[in-house]
Amino acid sequence: MAGLRRGDLAVLAVASAALPALAWLAPHLLDLRTAALLLVAAALPSVLGGDERTGFTRTARTAFGLLWIPLALTGLVTLGDTAVAVGLAVALGDVGAWCGGTALGRRGPLARPLSPLSPNKTWAGVLGAAAATGALLAVLGAFSPLLWAAVVGGCVLGDLVESMVKRESGVKDAGSWLPGFGGLLDRIDSLLVALLLAMVMT
């Protein structure tokens, strides 16, 4: 799949700054009207540029990026102190997943990969992430079943979503798929998904 162009990246950059600011200053405006404007913004660079060959693909990728990055970043505002707990839990969840995969994921049913997208992500790693995140949320006094599920879901799905995008794009480094954002995405892919899930589930 063709990479995003400057216009698409500009839409992502502006939205990444504007949506969290909107969530802070006028949260009541974050509704279906905002979603409609984001969809129009995703299409503008391709439509105005007359891109007949890859325009729809670029629009779809930009729209996905708008959901994945700017919308997730609004969670840093709307979730308040919970966003801090989510961030800490996701960070520890990565450690727990590694420990669980190392200790339990060498053989047996727990060694089965979650998805062909990332053979190293096993059910043992999920158990490790679940244990680590649940314990930390409890220590922080932020534990609830739904928030825990959101954090574990972010730990699991974040890496898989980025792996899917990179494979579809034919790149190994997210920075090649999304210049300026890719290196950062490698660090916060799980956090972004966890924030999205936490906003919906809590």
Image (spheres, rainbow, N blue to C red):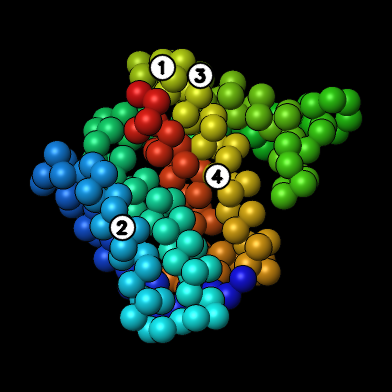
Cα gap from disc 4 to disc 1, whole angstroms: 21 Å
The answer to which image quadrant residue 131 occupies is: top right
Mark 3 vs mark 1, foreground winner is: 1
Q: Which of the two labelled residues, at mark 3 and mark 4, occupies the earlier sequence position?
A: 3
Mark 3: amino acid: Ala
Q: CA distance from mark 3 to mark 4?
A: 20 Å
Q: Position of residue 199 (x, y in %)?
A: 35, 33
Secondary structure found at label 1: loop
User: Does residue 61 lie above or below 200 as drawn?
Assistant: below
Q: Amino acid at mark 2?
A: Leu
Proximity of marks 2 and 3: CB atoms separated by less than 8 Å? no
CB atoms at circles 3 and 4 under 8 Å apart?
no
Disc ID at residue 38: 2
- Residue closest to the far left: 25
The mark lying in front, picked from 4 and 1, is 4
**Distance between the alpha carbons at the discs numbered 2 and 4:** 22 Å
Q: CA distance from mark 2 to mark 1?
A: 33 Å
| Residue that badge 1 annotates | 143
Sort mark 3 into few (<14), some (14-19) or many (20+) by Cα contacts within 10 Å. some
Q: Amino acid at mark 4?
A: Gly
Eyeballing the image, is 19 above or below 91?
A: below
Which secondary structure lies at badge 3?
helix
Q: Along the polypeptide, which appears first: circle 4 or circle 1?
A: 1
Of the residues shown, which amino acid type is indicated by label 1?
Phe
Q: Looking at the image, which residue is at 55% across and 37% down?
A: 155
Contact check, label 3 and label 1, Cβ < 8 Å: no
Image quarter in which the C terminus is found: top left
Label drawn at residue 135: 3
Residue marked by disc 4: 158
Position of 175 compared to 98: left or right? Answer: left
Residue 154 lies, in percent from the top left, at 51, 37
